[in-house]
Image (cartoon, rainbow, N blue to C red):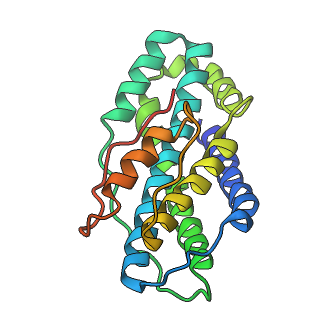
Amino acid sequence: MESDLATHVDTITATFETTLARVVPELSEPRAFDSDRIDKLITRVVETAVGFAVGLAAGDLVRAIDRTLGSEVAARVHARIHHAPARASHAAPAFTAKTVVADLEVRLRYRLRIATGELRSLFEYALAEVPADRARTLAVALVLAHQGSLLGERLGTAIVQGWRFACAAIDGTEPPALERGSPSQALWQRWSRLAGVTEEPKLEPYIVTM
C-alpha cells in the first residue's frame, strides 16, 4: 500500500501546484496597506484554504472507498479522519515578496506542501480501518479517488473567493456576494465574520467535503 499511497499523495501535490499556477495571476492587490492587518488576514486565508483543500482530498478518498470497499468501511475511514489528531501550527515564512499577492502565494505554496505530508499521515491513520486482505481493492480506490475529482477546481475557487473577502477586510469595504450554493459560500461567510478578530486563528478538525 505504501507505494500506492505515495503515488496518490504525489497526484494531490501536483494538483495543488497547478491550481496555484492557474489562480494566483487572477488575484488583485488590496488598495490599502496595513502590514500587521495584512499579515493576520493572509494567515487566516492560507489556513482556511489549506484546511478546505485537505477536506476535499479526504472526501475524494472516502467516496472512492465507498465505491470499492463499501459503505461500512467508508464510514469507518470517515470517522477515523474526523478523530485524527489535531494539526500542528506552522510558522509562516518571513515576508520576502515584493507584493501582497506574491506573499500570499509564497505562504500558500509553503502550507500546501506541508499539507501533503499531513495528508499522507492522515490517510495512513485512517486507512488502518481497511482490512489487510483488501489491499488490492484499496489500490483501485486510490486511483479512482482522482477520477472526476473537483479538488483543483474547488480549491481554486476557494482561494479566489477567500482573497476577495480578505481584500474587502483589508480595504474596509463590504465583503463580496457569493453565488448561492457555492461549495465554499458558508466557509467564507463565516470567515468574514471572524476577519476582524485579532487573535491567532484556531486549529479546527479537518472538513471532509462530501
Q: Which residue is drawn at 39% across and 20% down?
A: 76
Q: Residue at x 39, y 42 (%)?
A: 206
Q: Which residue is drawn at 44% across and 54% down?
A: 48
Whether 115 is drawn above or below 143: the answer is: below
2, 178: nearer the viewer: 178
Q: Residue 37 in the image: x percent, y percent?
A: 37, 77
Whether 124 is drawn above or below 22: the answer is: above
Q: Is any part of residue 138 visible from this angle?
A: yes
Q: In this view, does 41 lie to the left or right of 178?
A: left
Q: Residue 203 in the image: x percent, y percent?
A: 30, 54
180, 2: nearer the viewer: 180
Q: Residue 105 in the image: x percent, y percent?
A: 61, 71
Which residue, as the protein is rendered here, is positioned at the far left?
199
Whether 199 is drawn above or below 100: the answer is: above
100, 193: nearer the viewer: 193
Q: Residue 118 in the image: x percent, y percent?
A: 46, 52
Q: Specify the quadrant that holds the N terminus.
A: top right
Q: In this view, does 103 lie to the left or right of 195?
A: right
Instruction: Name the image quarter holding residue 27.
Output: bottom right
Whether 3 is drawn above or below 23: the answer is: above
Q: In this view, does 88 lie to the left or right of 110?
A: left
Q: Residue at x 64, y 19 (%)?
A: 137
Q: Is residue 12 left or right of residue 73?
A: right
